[in-house]
Image (cartoon, coloured by chain):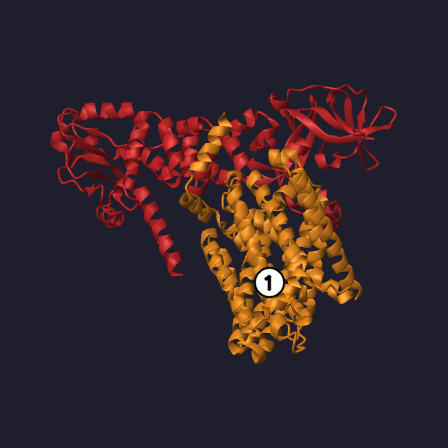
Chain colours: A red, B orange
Amino acid sequence: MTSLKTFYLSRILGNKVVSEQRKAVGKLEDLVVDLNQVRPMVFALKVRFGSTSLLIDFAHVTIFKQERNYIVQCHQLVEVNIPKENALFLAKHVMDRQIIDIDGRKLERVNDLRMAYLSSGLFVVAVDVGVEGLLRRLSVAKPINQTLKPFGKALPSRLILWDDIAAISPSQDGIKLGKEQSKISTLHPSDLADILEDLDHKTRVAVFSELDEEKAADVLEEMDNETQVSMLESLSVEKAADVLEKMPADEVADILDDLEEDKANELLDEMEEEASEEVRELMEYPENTVGSLMSTEYFSFHETMTVENTILELRRIKPPSDTIYYLYVLDDQERLVATVSLRDLIVSDPQTTLHEIMNRKVIKVDDYDKIDSLGEIISKYNLIAIPVVDEEERMAGIVIIDDVVFTLMKARKRKVLKED
Amino acid sequence: MMKAVATLKTKHISLWKRLAIFMAILGPGIITGSVDNDAGGITTYSVAGAVYGYNLLWTLVPAFFVLVVVQEMNARMGMVTGKGLADLIRENSALKATFFIFFAQLLTDIGNTTTEFAGVAGSMQVFGVSKYISVPLVGIGVWFLAVKGNYKMVERVFLIFSVFLLSYVVSAVMGKPHWTEIGHAMISPKIDMNLAYLVIVVGIIGTTIAPWMQFYMQSAVIEKGLKIKDYKYTLVDVVIGCVITVVVAFFIIVACGSTLYPNGVVIDEAKDAALSLKPFAGEFASMIFAFGLFVASVFSATILPVASSFYICQAFGFEAGIDKKFKEAPQFYGLYTFMLLISMIIILIPNAPLIKITLWSQVLNGMLLPVVLVSMMLLINKEEIMGKWVNKRWQNIVGWGTVSVLIILSTTLVVLNIFT
């Protein structure tokens, strides 16, 4: 009899559970960990007795190895009750399922789980996602490894620490994946968007709904068009509207354009009026016009403002990096008269007014100009953003180079495919 | 109350809007239905027509119902779970069983792909092109279409392909069929009770429901982002697909039944059918027949190996998908290229026994089909997977009935092929 330090879950699943006298009492179906605990400690066994399964307290259980067999011995059968939302069943919810590898930023399928006895109990320490785990389950890992040994090789094994993965079990079991969810939240929005695109729609909605609105908005923005649409159709109207409010109006307009009209209107009605008004205006522009692409988030000032006040104002608003480089000077009728670059602002004396440093030769486009014309202007003048004005020269928004490049690339791809 | 409002709303959807929704959803069923008439299918139908005339046309009626029942279940599972059949099997059955299914799937699909290339080789020989030219060229073309194309583009190409399959109607009509005899054969068929007859009956039904198509159908539904709310439209799509399958099969049997059968021409390859049509229906009919065979073979050779590699990789947790780069998904691309290459090599071996290969790949399909269908029936009855969309009582009666008949037929086919 050897006491075990570490072992794989697959070695004990389906084994007999024996009593003190080594009599078989049932069959081991699953191990249960408590999601409320800081560490994933096993606190119950799911054992099948004939036609019923019961949850048995793990406190009276020892697992050891004897003559190459893994023995699960239960000294006392004590049934336990656990709130459903805290119980993660390792075989049912993790084994053979997909998990998110937080460091590797992708989905992996779990082939096995690595368990370890520590002083305080039995813990899950890692998941096995490698080929070795797969072959071990097929009972061929050992013979293959023995064959490979003389050649100085071994099957590649790949373990990921439990802390570095997030379990994403289907929501219908009502599990609260609180801690797993906070691990997911540490992912970059664009990585998370990629992962969600690969998930089935149920799990996708479950993971997404638990994100806070800011994060959800960032992630939604990064998803491909089809996933965005499917996401908005599956979320509750309230949740979807809350997330959309946190997104830039031009992005929202883009997504809603692809939705069924009724659904889009329903969402717009649910959104705060200020946000939805802007989106509605943008949605009125035809698809290939500058207006449909522009962002309405820009910063404008009056020419009488001093450099110092302008900088103070910028510090207060903290604009994102793609809109801070150019500031726009508008007159009383909201007409665009000049631009001020961030550079000019910083190198000028604090007391100068914008009027003195502003550049009146503004490169701008009309909101109904074709998108195709933007590429030329942007490359010619080396701009990061271009202001957009309406027919009365009033400032309507700005077009950011990233959006232009993205749109032109998409159009180009389509063209190439057509020529094929 | 809520329900009343909901029905009221559906009633208000205009005919045009319904049509628009349907056009957007259309695809998975029709494509699957068309791929169904691959080189193996065409061979079986041609032989059936040449040997038994119109006598076997009745088999298409049960084949149609079985096809609808099976594919409806696939579509429903795809829409409810958002998961592929491969994922569901991996997550819900023992790993050893999963491994067996997918290993068998791999062997079968290599056989099937080989059959498709045999179709390419045969049809091009009718046009005087050597197989040493046609097979490598098509192989390379297929590889690029699958690797470089995206789903939307591929789907469009395939929908056009489906139209070409109607060329069989032309060759059938040119053979001046006797419609009264056809009607008579359909209504009161004269069923022979001998071994050869049974083999061909099993062959027709078996080739209509190939195991890999179940995986393909379910993935196509997911790829298209269909949800259970689209159920009604998807059902129509499925039925249309099945109609296409049997209509094309019908005309192939008619084409051969009106020309080759009365003149006692014996064939055992689809290519022979095309060649033998010439003296009875004219050169044009012969070329049209060969062209249809070519299109069908290329069609299936494009979908089959890439789909098959995709399911296998998904089930075992390797990255997969044509949107991934080679470096990101080496197992997927490796497997795909391997399948294409080995099939091409088998065909290019001088004097390769093409008929035997076709026959054996049908036997393998026959062995795998019951396993896949039983897995499907078990999955679709699990409430934790399907929720309220589990099979209803009558669906289970129809489903299990179909499965048992197919199991009996497949086992008979396998046994007959081994012992005769």
Which sits in the foreground, A208 or A184? A208
Where the N terminus of chain A falls, by quadrant? top right
Which residue is the site of mark 1? B249
Left or right? Give the position of B86 relative to A353: right
Residue at left 66%, top 64%?
Answer: B185
Q: Quadrant of residue A58?
A: top right
Residue at left 58%, top 58%?
Answer: B245
Badge 1: few (under 14), some or many (20 or more) residues near its Cα, within 10 Å?
A: many
Decide if residue B57 is in sight here. Answer: no
Residue B100, percent from left and from top: 71, 49
Residue A268, percent from left and from top: 36, 30
Residue B233, percent from left and from top: 51, 45
Residue at left 73%, top 63%?
Answer: B191
Which sits in the foreground, B166 or B159? B166
Decide if residue B199 is in sight here. Answer: yes
Left or right? Give the position of B1 relative to B342: left
Could you tell me which chain the residue with mark 1 belongs to?
B
Which sits in the foreground, A166 or B4? B4
Residue B44, percent from left and from top: 65, 65
In this rendering, is residue B338 above or below A348?
Answer: below
Left or right? Give the position of A258 relative to B125: left
The kind of residue tagged 1 is Ala
